[in-house]
Amino acid sequence: MSDEKDSGAGESVAKSDDEKPTVGPHELWMRFRFVILVGLSVLVVVVAASFVFISRTPSVDELRDQAGLNGKQTLRIGVKFDQPGIAERQPDGTFSGFDIEIAYLVAEDLGFRRNEIEFYQIQSEDRERMQAQTPDGANVVIVDLVVASFSITDDRAKTPGVAFSAAYLYTEQSVLTLGDHPPVATLEDLRGKNVCSLATSSSATAAFAAGNLVRSKLTISECVAALRSGEVEAISTDATILGGIKAKNPDLAHWDIGLTNNEAYGINVGENAALLTLVNLSLWHSREDPDDDRWEDAFDRNIRVNIPLNPGVPLARPEQPQVAPKPEVREWFSGGLG
């Protein structure tokens, strides 16, 4: 037994470390539990902070960085080239039309000047792959955006590499014939007749279903040539496209065929989620900002001008997201043209 000495107060104290009081099981458990609780508290704080950081809305500059736009010198956009009023390549090499102005609108909001935008011709069948061509057709170019009268469909949206923006224009299918053709009220009026449509176009489905003998072409200009040569009796595709053709060819007849399914044009951004968010933000802003008239101006210059030539063919701006349009253009958002 260890020696003890008097503390001077009539009490004995331990003389060596061996005689210090021992810690019991209960006190050990309490200490252990304290350590666990402290550790869990720290973990909860870390996880919560991480969740807030990850789930917060990224800034526009962060989205630009994620989309690969920061430091990018040019924005490549695939467009059609033979669709008057929508997208047409002029003799001097420039492009004009509603899709072109929508492309400028979005590109500007993405931070690109007009001289930093490059337009490339794209065929209908290449819009999903985002593979355009140089004007001479010699080289393939992978583009950043496709703004090419590209109708949003469930099948296309499921295709790998395709991501559609919100719709930026609604139209519907119509028919174009020679001026002396009997009236066309429905596609069934052309049952058993040769009808031209664009390759991989959504319009071909309805024509097939109506018993039309569909002759697919790569471009609308080829369809017009086939109509004039007698190879086909009619052309059927989007009213926006045929309205522009009619405006440049007054001797042709444009028919509203009463289809109720709207064609909604969207922008394909490929597999770039951040870019998709930025494009949708641009389209949303063009609707929400009462001082932003770029969409309305583009519509007036390129599509509305053709409306008097095509009574009864509805054209409209999408109502998504649901917001009240500006009073001066409300009739064009939701009304028909009759």
Image (cartoon, grey):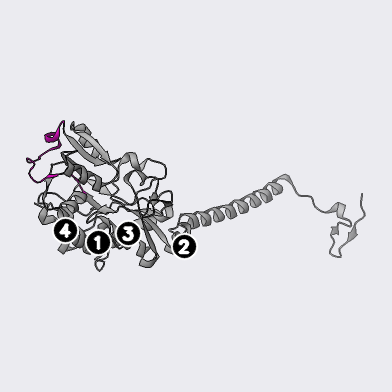
Q: Which residue is mark 4?
A: 304
Front residue of 61 and 50: 61
Residue 300 forms part of the magenta stretch:
no
Q: Which circle's residue, 3 or 4, is located before the other in the chain? A: 3
Binning the other alpha carbons within 10 Å of mark 1 as few (below 14), some (14 to 19) or many (20 upward) gives some
Q: Which circle's residue, 2 or 3, is located before the other in the chain? A: 2
Q: Nearer the viewer, mark 3 or mark 1?
A: 3
Q: Helix or strand or loop: what does disc 2 sit on?
A: loop
Front residue of 25 and 294: 294
Front residue of 159 and 212: 212
From this view, report whether residue 114 is shown above or below residue 266: below
The amino acid type found where label 3 is placed reads: Ala
Q: Which residue is mark 3?
A: 103
Q: Which circle's residue, 3 or 1, is located before the other in the chain? A: 3
Residue 72 circle label: 2
Does residue 113 appear anywhere in the picture?
Answer: no
**Magenta residues, start to end:** 171-192
Binning the other alpha carbons within 10 Å of mark 4 as few (below 14), some (14 to 19) or many (20 upward) gives some
Q: Helix or strand or loop: what does disc 1 sit on?
A: helix
Q: Which circle's residue, 1 or 2, is located before the other in the chain? A: 2
Q: How many marks?
A: 4
- Label 3 – label 1 distance at C-alpha: 11 Å
Q: Which residue is mark 1?
A: 295
Q: Nearer the viewer, mark 1 or mark 2?
A: 2
- Label 3 – label 4 distance at C-alpha: 18 Å
Q: Which circle's residue, 2 or 4, is located before the other in the chain? A: 2
